[in-house]
Amino acid sequence: MMFKKILIANRGEIACRVAATARRLGIRTVAVYSEVDAGAKHVALCDEAVAIGGQAAAESYLRWERIIEAACASGAQAIHPGYGFLSENEAFASACAQAGLVFVGPPATAIRAMGLKAESKRLMALANVPLVPGYHGDDQDPHLLLHEANRIGYPVLIKASAGGGGKGMRVVQRQEEFAQALASCQREAQSSFADAAVLIEKYVQRPRHIEIQVFGDSLGNFVYLFERDCSVQRRHQKVLEEAPAPGLSEELRQQIGLTALEAARAVGYVGAGTVEFIVEQPDEGGMRFYFMEMNTRLQVEHPVTEAITGLDLVEWQLRVAAGEPLPLKQDQLKRHGHAIEARICAENPDKQFLPATGTLRTYELPAISEFSPSALRVDSGVRQGDAISPFYDSMVAKLIVHADTREQALARLDAALAATRIVGLPTNVQFLRHVVQSQSFAQANLDTALITREATVLFEQERVGLNLAAAAVVAHTLLAEQSMQKNQAWNEPWAQRDGWRMFGQAHRHFDLEFHGQRQTALLHYGHDGALDLQVGSSTSALHFSARADGIALDFADHRLCVQVICQGELAHVFTPQGATQITLLDALSHAGEALVETGNLAAPMPGKLVTFHVRPGDTVRQGQVLAVMEAMKMEHTISAPADGEVAELLYAPGDQVPEGAMLLTLKT
Ligand code: ADP
Ligand code: ADP
Ligand code: MG
């Protein structure tokens, strides 16, 4: 019998993902949330929610006694653990059973068997699953470990046996580096997993990460849902994942799939699991694959498998957990097209991928096309205004594209990333675009060193030049002023920017900062309403108009749609080529300057009043020069915004005048 109600023991995108399937299947959902997550999206999406207190994972999502209590109290029949947190916790899986709850995952025995890398390798050796040459014994004597490393031959990889998420891993190139790398791996293993045990493996040549999605049911049936390639990694963590793995012969593909089933069978696996292989691509050609580890849970990158098979893996998990047989047999499984997933993370790729926190001030993800809804999928656990806190993972969202061919999928992913606009914290969105556009990725020249190899085109990139950034921010400012004027009920005649060009031509300065350099953009107003923008030594005609999705910009012989989102003085400029930031310095004083030009009779900047050209009682014509100021070694004239009569002079020649101070009053 399918469950009527389940508790989702997770947060973020995966909690939302599980809730979506549950809703579709008519299963009621119970969310749990920490103190920081009271207003989170996953809480809003579920039918009920239970506060479990705390902030850090250890005080909230990892407190399984409370979570089990919440499940029992709310009448849930099963707990879905998502990934991370409690998903691979054997004690939790057992405790669920003791409380009469179904754990949506494998039996505790299978979690234990695959939990420690070293132990799982011993088991796999018995099941004739190929292993990377290495040492995975209990004896952790440093001399023995060094001896083993020498025997295996360098380079070797030291791994935390209890590890996950790439933590603790150290590549050792030479014998002399071994002792230090071992000590540092042990320290990290102890602090992250409370277990300092390590194993040593040969570091394979041109390694490629290929994993198999497997499924077992409680009746002893097994299938594999093809492979995923997750070779694009940073710090041994996945960045882009795709299915199918490019360039694999059907024979090898099937061989790896069947090997994964052997691994799953050997531990009596039930539910969704992933068997990870490291694939060696020796210089002399060919490919060899070795078992790396098994993740006994749903994987972050499961959507690419869903895209190519058209299946809902969470539904499969729930059916299997409810005791149903696997919905399909191996020969009924078909794959279609190519899918790629990109993980959008709050981090700074140019600073060694340092994770970032902050508020998602603007959070616009690409729209899903109504013509082909399966072409793009967005899995996100946050909304605009939400914060990425330091307590949990830095992953913000996942974009998943699907197309007939890899080439099309790549183009789709690039377009989806271009339409992703996040302001408020640094993300890897631009970096992901650079990876997608890199030669190695485009040509499927895949291995785990891809990011290092392509570093020169991935890091510290600027695809939007000063001229375009300046044109975008100027156009944005002018449009914002126009719309402000339209909204002003009083609509004073001098508030109209375009009415002001008495001398046939006028200028307006924009002080900018781009990549730490001060820059000036000079806007020339022509007789006929035409605008020219001068940036540095080049001048081009500037045309623009507001569009629903941004600004249609025509500048320097280019037409494109840009979007500008301002955060104080900092303007985030999004263009089809990429995104950049440019600062419009002292926007306030520029606003003042604009008002002076259009008729506000205030000082555009702090300076000295040189002279008045009028006296009280004088009638003046629009545009007539009223006063001259000197500031920053330049003279600035203040002209009449409209016909009128001078009422009062508020300063005397020689006075120091603060910025924004009214110099005189005018009756119109
Ligand atoms: P996948 O193979 O699914 O990509 P990852 O290693 O990226 O798996 O981890 C998936 C999620 O689980 C991540 O959000 C990560 O933070 C979390 N995770 C994985 N292993 C651990 C661990 N040992 N301790 C804490 N979190 C982990
Ligand atoms: P984790 O549990 O942290 O995910 P894994 O054993 O799955 O650890 O390895 C993570 C990544 O490290 C792999 O995806 C791969 O890029 C790299 N890696 C692991 N083992 C090897 C190896 N023997 N040779 C080369 N690279 C490896
Ligand atoms: Mg792994």
Image (tube, grey):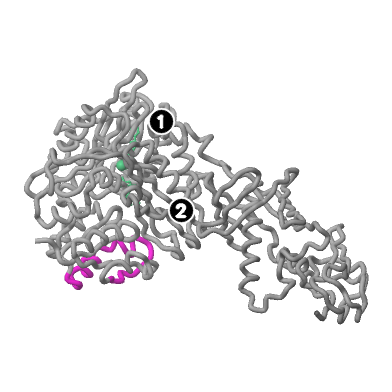
Which residues are the magenta region?
49-75
Residue 498 lies left or right of residue 203; in this view the side is right
From this viewpoint, is residue 119 visible? no
Q: Quadrant of residue 305?
A: top left
Residue 73: within the magenta?
A: yes
Q: Picture coordinates of residue 106 (x, y %)?
A: 17, 50
Mark 2 lies within 8 Å of ligand 1 (Cβ measured): no
Foreground disc of the pair 1, 2: 1
Labelled disc at residue 346: 2
Residue 18 lies left or right of residue 547; in this view the side is left
Q: Residues within 10 Å of mark 1 (few under 14, many from 20)?
A: few
Q: What's under tag 2, amino acid-wise?
A: Ala
Vertical order, 98 against 461 (above or below):
below
Q: How far apart are labels 1 and 2 at the CA level?
A: 28 Å
- The mark tally for this picture is 2
Residue 571: within the magenta?
A: no
Q: Which residue is rendered at x = 78% and y = 62% of the image?
A: 501
Q: As rendered, which of 537 and 75 lies closer to the eye? A: 537
First in sequence: mark 1 or mark 2? 2
Labelled disc at residue 443: 1
Q: Picture coordinates of residue 377 (x, y %)?
A: 34, 51
Q: What's under tag 1, amino acid-wise?
A: Gln
Q: Picture coordinates of residue 308 (x, y %)?
A: 26, 43
